[in-house]
Image (cartoon, helix red, strand yellow):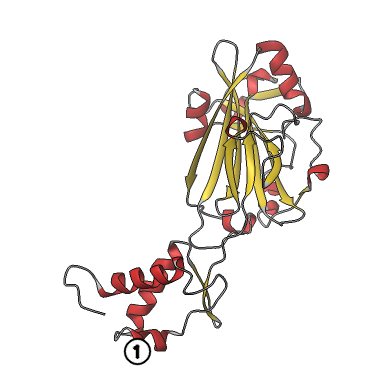
């Protein structure tokens, strides 16, 4: 390896190792040579090798298993999340059958904390909209929303998703008072939210957006993700009234290496490859 005065040595080694991985010099799942061997191979120190490996692990190309070594990270088959597929039930529709589509509800490690705060899967919890949630619904911070969530796991691939929904509270309940004196009296059951909104504010329409971010907190463990180098895929659908007012938004959080998303118009076949049978 020739010296490059303009680049740190660990970056040069990372570039060379990355090239070896991408060109299948090392196969998926294969162990890389040990740090001592690589240090001798590149005529450098083990800390330099370690830094180069950390870079590739952060890029999602390598997995470091302490006590076992460093391995090329296999790329799992991705499942498809479709938007706008009228031939199948929407995944939040009461008629949607997760079990028929090989999905099951699961309990995740952070469930105990949610239970302490009064959150039950698939039920509605009334809470204030803050930050990004308020922005999406175009309301001021502190406005009340009905929050629902669930975790699903694919029975074949064991891949997980987190599904949540936020509905403006005054659309499904009577809200009186402010702060500690606020009282909420629901008048619509959660399973009837969409039918009620369609009846009162329809015809409804939706906008869908997709973005990624790095997961934080308990997300890695809850979704069974690799702790380093895996982005979180976020599919967000906003429900709009006939006058364009945001009424609700739904989010799917999924490991970016296990899922991708597309509009059904991107496909000609009735059953796209890798379908996860999710439609929003």
Task: Find residue 223 and report its horizontal and vertical position in percent.
Answer: 63, 54
Depth check: give the residue in front, 214 or 119. Answer: 214
**Residue drawn where x is 55% and y is 16% of the image:** 245
Kindly indicate the quadrant of the structure image that contains residue 87. Answer: top right
Image label count: 1
Q: Residues within 10 Å of mark 1 (few under 14, many from 20)?
A: few
Task: Find residue 62 and report its horizontal and vertical position in percent.
Answer: 49, 69
Kindly indicate the quadrant of the structure image that contains residue 196. Answer: top right
Task: Find residue 153 and report its horizontal and vertical position in percent.
Answer: 72, 51
Q: Which quarter of the rendering shows the C terminus? A: top right
**Residue drawn where x is 64% and y is 33% of the image:** 268
Q: Does residue 257 sit above or below 262 in this rendering? A: below
Depth check: give the residue in front, 119 or 4. Answer: 4
* Residue located farthest toward the front when viewing the structure as drawn: 268
Kindly indicate the quadrant of the structure image that contains residue 171. Answer: top right
**Residue drawn where x is 39% and y is 72% of the image:** 17
Task: Find residue 238 and report its horizontal and vertical position in percent.
Answer: 57, 27
Q: Is residue 263 left or right of residue 94?
A: left
Any part of residue 174 in sight: no
**Residue drawn where x is 72% and y is 23% of the image:** 194
Q: Which quarter of the rendering shows the N terminus? A: bottom left
Any part of residue 89 in sight: yes
Q: From the image, tell me which residue sits under label 1.
A: 40
Q: Does residue 64 sit above or below 76 in this rendering? A: below
Dot 1 falls on a residue whose secondary structure is helix
* Residue located farthest toward the left when viewing the structure as drawn: 5
């Amino acid at each position: 390896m020739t010296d490059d005065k303009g680049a740190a040595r660990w970056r040069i080694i990372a570039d060379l190792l990355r090239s070896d991985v991408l060109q299948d010099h090392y196969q998926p799942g294969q162990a890389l040579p040990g740090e001592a061997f690589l240090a001798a191979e590149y005529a450098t120190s083990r800390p330099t090798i370690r830094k180069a490996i950390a870079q590739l692990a952060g890029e999602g190309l390598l997995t470091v298993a302490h006590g076992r070594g460093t391995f090329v990270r296999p790329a799992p088959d991705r499942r498809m999340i479709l938007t706008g597929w009228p031939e199948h039930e929407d995944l939040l529709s009461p008629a949607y059958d997760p079990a028929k589509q090989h999905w099951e509800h699961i309990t995740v490690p952070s469930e105990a904390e949610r239970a302490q705060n009064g959150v039950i899967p698939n039920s509605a919890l009334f809470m204030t909209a803050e930050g990004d949630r308020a922005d999406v619904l175009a309301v001021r911070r502190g406005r009340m929303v009905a929050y629902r969530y669930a975790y699903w796991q694919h029975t074949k691939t064991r891949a997980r998703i987190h599904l949540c929904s936020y509905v403006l509270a005054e659309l499904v309940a009577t809200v009186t008072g402010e702060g500690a004196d606020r009282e909420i009296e629901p008048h619509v059951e959660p399973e009837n939210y969409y039918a009620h909104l369609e009846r009162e504010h329809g015809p409804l329409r939706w906008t869908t957006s997709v973005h990624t971010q790095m997961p934080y907190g308990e997300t890695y463990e809850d979704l069974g993700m690799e702790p380093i180098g895996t982005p979180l895929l976020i599919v967000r659908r906003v429900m709009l009234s006939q006058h364009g007012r945001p009424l609700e938004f739904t989010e799917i959080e999924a490991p970016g290496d296990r899922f991708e998303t597309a509009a059904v118009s991107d496909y000609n076949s009735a059953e796209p490859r890798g379908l996860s049978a999710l439609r929003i």
